[in-house]
Image: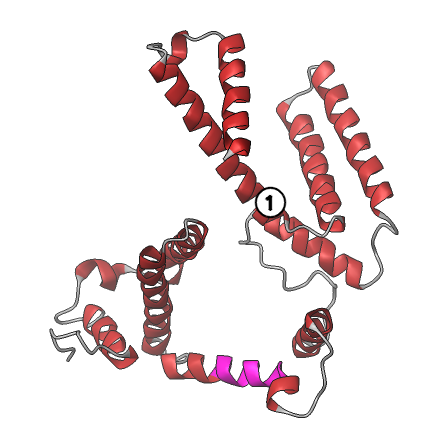
């Protein structure tokens, strides 16, 4: 049974807490009702909150969010152990063995020149571990955010030679997809046709960003943060002018937007 004193807590303490929460006799009713599918959304949420703490450069929040994410791992491992699948120790053993296997330049005598070479070696190790596959795209998780999944699908296809030879062709493709979407808009197409063309445009845009050497998920997160900062500055300008946002005309809001951009770049 876990002690109430967690001042010197270890992973074993956390495992004991998790086992107690799932104890059929004295556990928590909510925890006992959960299964892998019901917990999965919380696992994703905690992973995103870790990223958010990093982007906010908040070390205290990062410590807290890493704890929440670790708890998710422990939760899944406990449910797996109850089914006789594997234990938390098996999870730890598996990742330790994998890290040693995929880093022969650290734990053996293989020589890796630089980080780029290591990335290529890492992918080769993963391909060998995946073994024979029917498709080069097998194993790209469906649950990934669509932007990230598009990026990974394109990288997989590129590794087997299915890729644009230069970024210029990708740029032309983006313009083509934009024209096709505008044509559907001008012809008042239905939502299915618009969604289809919008998906093609977004996929092409991800490809262009990939060819530029940028990860689209990170780029869009930065874009979201930039928009949030500038929009909130516009709200401040509106408030300082004694106005209501909903009553402010678009020309004035656009002026405030440009002013917010200038203020940000001058800092």
Quarter of the image that includes the N terminus: bottom left
| Side (left or right) of 50 relative to 23 | right
Mark 1 closeness class: few <14, some 14–19, many ≥20 residues within 10 Å: few
Total marks in image = 1
Seen from the viewer's position, the closer of residues 96 and 23 is 96
Q: Position of residue 267 (x, y in %)?
A: 49, 35
Seen from the viewer's position, the closer of residues 267 and 169 is 267
Asked if residue 263 lies in the magenta stretch, the reply is no
Which residue is at a point 65% across and 21% down the rendered structure image? 190
Secondary structure of the residue carrying tag 1 is helix
Residue located farthest toward the bottom when viewing the structure as drawn: 109
Q: How is the image coloured?
A: secondary structure
| Side (left or right) of 96 relative to 23 | right
Q: Quadrant of residue 131?
A: bottom right
Q: Position of residue 59 (x, y in %)?
A: 36, 58
Magenta stretch: helix, strand or loop mostly:
helix
Work out whether 126 lies above or below 43.
below
Work out whether 3 lies above or below 158.
below
Residue position for label 1: 219
Q: Position of residue 23 (x, y in %)?
A: 19, 72
Seen from the viewer's position, the closer of residues 107 and 46 is 107
Work out whether 218 lies above or below 34.
above
């Amino acid at each position: 049974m876990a002690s109430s004193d967690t001042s010197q807590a270890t992973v074993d303490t956390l495992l004991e807490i998790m086992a107690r929460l799932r104890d059929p006799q004295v556990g928590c009713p909510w925890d006992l009702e959960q299964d892998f599918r019901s917990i999965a959304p919380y696992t994703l949420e905690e992973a995103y909150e870790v990223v958010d703490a990093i982007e906010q450069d908040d070390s205290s929040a990062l410590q807290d969010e890493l704890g929440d994410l670790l708890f998710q791992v422990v939760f899944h491992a406990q449910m797996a152990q109850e089914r006789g699948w594997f234990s938390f120790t098996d999870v730890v053993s598996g990742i330790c063995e994998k890290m040693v296997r995929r880093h022969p330049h650290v734990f053996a005598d293989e020589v890796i020149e630089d980080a780029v070479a290591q990335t290529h070696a890492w992918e080769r190790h993963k391909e060998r571990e995946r073994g024979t596959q029917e498709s080069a795209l097998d194993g790209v998780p469906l649950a990934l955010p669509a932007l990230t999944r598009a990026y990974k699908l394109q990288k997989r296809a590129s590794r087997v030679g299915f890729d644009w030879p230069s970024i210029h062709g990708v740029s032309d493709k983006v313009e083509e997809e934009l024209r096709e979407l505008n044509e559907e808009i001008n012809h008042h197409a239905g939502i299915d046709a618009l969604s289809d063309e919008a998906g093609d445009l977004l996929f092409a845009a991800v490809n262009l960003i990939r060819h530029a050497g940028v990860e689209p998920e990170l780029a869009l997160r930065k874009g979201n943060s930039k928009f949030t900062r500038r929009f909130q500055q516009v709200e401040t300008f509106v408030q300082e002018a004694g106005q209501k946002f909903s009553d402010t005309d678009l020309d004035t809001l656009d002026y405030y937007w440009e002013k917010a951009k200038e203020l940000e770049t001058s800092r």
